[in-house]
């Protein structure tokens, strides 16, 4: 059992190191209105907090943006990422936001990659594999960054579990 626990830690470390910076694939402009400067600054601040691994600040800033842009898939994806990457991951919240991001934008590559990684953390590799296949379908190949990253995480997970 101890070997299994150590193996799980190795996989989680690989997953954490795999994504140095969150991918939010900014594609979701809400409406045709001019961008709100305050919200843009909060989103920029959130991205900076993510880069600095200040998850509490990132979540706070992203929740503020989300109140004003509830249909922004990128913000939901970044929130899911932040909840998942905390020292004590909140996978329930991460899944909630990833699923919302994918409902809003079913082709959101970052959300597919990150929900797949979350499923590996939740010991559900078949679900991760399902999202890997969706990434391949969206990219049309196996060379896009999100496919490569999730594929490597899945391989590392399977290698440790064997």
Image (cartoon, rainbow, N blue to C red):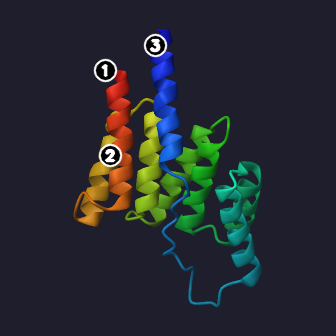
Front-most of residues 90 and 149:
149
- Helix, strand or loop at label 2? It is helix
Badge 2: residue crowd in 10 Å (few <14, some 14–19, many ≥20): many
Residue 68, visible in the rendered structure: yes
> Residue at (32%, 37%) from the top-left corner?
155
> Residue at (52%, 26%) from the top-left corner?
9
Q: Quadrant of residue 139?
A: bottom left
> Which residue is the site of mark 2?
151
> Residue at (48%, 75%) from the top-left corner?
27
| Image quarter in which the C terminus is found | top left
- How far, Cα to Cα, is label 1 from label 3? 11 Å
Q: Is residue 132 above or below residue 125?
A: below
Question: Could you say where residue 124 lies in the image, as x and y percent from the top left?
Answer: 40, 32
Badge 3: residue crowd in 10 Å (few <14, some 14–19, many ≥20): few
Q: Is residue 76 above or below residue 133?
A: below
> Which residue is the site of mark 3?
3
Question: Could you say where residue 92 lies in the image, as x and y percent from the top left?
Answer: 58, 39
Q: Residue furthest top?
A: 1
- Helix, strand or loop at label 3? It is helix
Question: Could you say where residue 52 lies in the image, as x and y percent from the top left?
Answer: 70, 55
Q: Which dot marks residue 162?
A: 1
Q: Is residue 90 above or below residue 65?
A: above
Residue 127, visible in the rendered structure: no
Q: Is residue 53 above or below residue 153?
A: below
- How far, Cα to Cα, is label 1 from label 2? 17 Å
> Residue at (52%, 73%) from the top-left corner?
26
| For marks 1 and 2 on the same chain, the one whose residue lies earlier in the sequence | 2
- How far, Cα to Cα, is label 3 from label 2? 24 Å
| For marks 3 and 2 on the same chain, the one whose residue lies earlier in the sequence | 3
The reply, left or right, for residue 83 in relation to residue 7 is: right
The answer to whether the residues at label 1 and label 3 have Cβ atoms under 8 Å apart is no
């Amino acid at each position: 059992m101890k070997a299994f626990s150590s193996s799980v830690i190795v996989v989680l470390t690989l997953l954490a190191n795999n994504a140095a910076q969150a991918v939010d694939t900014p594609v979701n402009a809400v409406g045709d209105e001019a961008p709100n400067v305050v919200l843009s600054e909060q989103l920029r601040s959130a991205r900076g907090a993510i880069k600095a691994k200040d998850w509490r600040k990132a979540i706070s800033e992203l929740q503020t943006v989300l109140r004003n842009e509830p249909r922004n898939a990128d913000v939901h994806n970044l929130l899911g990422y932040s909840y998942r990457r905390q020292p004590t991951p909140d996978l329930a919240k991460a899944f909630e936001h990833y699923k919302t991001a994918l409902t809003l934008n079913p082709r959101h590559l970052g959300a597919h990659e990150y929900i797949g990684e979350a499923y590996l953390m939740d010991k559900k590799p078949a679900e991760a594999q399902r999202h890997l296949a969706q990434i391949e379908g969206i990219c049309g190949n196996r060379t896009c960054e999100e496919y490569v990253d999730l594929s490597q995480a899945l391989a590392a997970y399977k290698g440790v579990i064997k």
